[in-house]
Amino acid sequence: MEKEGCDQTVYTYTILIDGQFKEHRNEEALKLWDMMIDKGITPTAASFRALSIGLCLSGKVARACKILDDLAPMGVTETAFEDMINVLCKAGRVKEACKLVDGIVDRGREIPGRIRTVLINALRKSGNADLAMKLMHSKIGIGYDRWGSVKKRVKFRILIDI
């Protein structure tokens, strides 16, 4: 791009990153991401979506979460967790999706109701209607369990164990 005098924008990098992940060239996609950041090009929600979905599908959910935490102050991560949860469920990685949602809570963040809805819809669409129904009728994500006088948030991980 530099040789041809093309503008290097967040949009061109997003297209390239997405294409690299689709071709299973994960390391090249990550190099492009780092190159974009090093050049001072601010990522958008779409560029992070391409990166996070690619990382999740390649099994690098922790890496996606770390990048998400780094980008949180920029405000580009509004729907990132929903996208990641959705893609994990569609790929049949329900256990990883549940761990990701629990990780949000462990970081001290609240679970918006829409994440619960995204998880229910993704489970239903991926053929896990039984798990979707269990989640819909449970206290997971919205309620608390009581053990004596101690109140503890119900974790999404128990969905898999139900």
Image: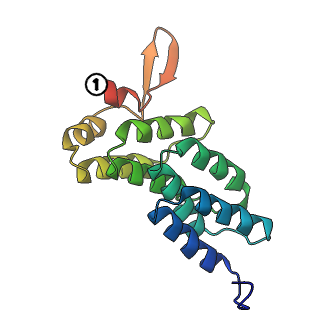
Q: Residue at x 61, y 46 (%)?
A: 63
Q: Position of residue 121 (x, y in %)?
A: 30, 52
Q: Is 155 in front, or is 54?
A: 54
Q: Is 67 in front, or is 33?
A: 33
Q: Residue at x 67, y 68 (%)?
A: 43
Q: What number of labels is visible?
A: 1
Q: Secondary structure at mark 1?
A: loop
Q: Residue at x 68, y 80 (%)?
A: 9
Q: What residue would you read off at disc 1?
A: 162
* Quadrant assignment for the C terminus: top left
Q: Residue furthest front?
A: 3
Rendered position, 11 above or below 135: below
Residue 117 shown left or right of residue 33 in the figure: left
> As shown in the figure, which amino acid type bears the numbered disc 1?
Ile
Residue 29 shown left or right of residue 148 in the figure: right
Rendered position, 154 above or below 84: above
Crowding near the residue tagged with mark 1, few <14, some 14–19, many ≥20 C-alpha atoms within 10 Å:
few
Q: Residue at x 68, y 54 (%)?
A: 72
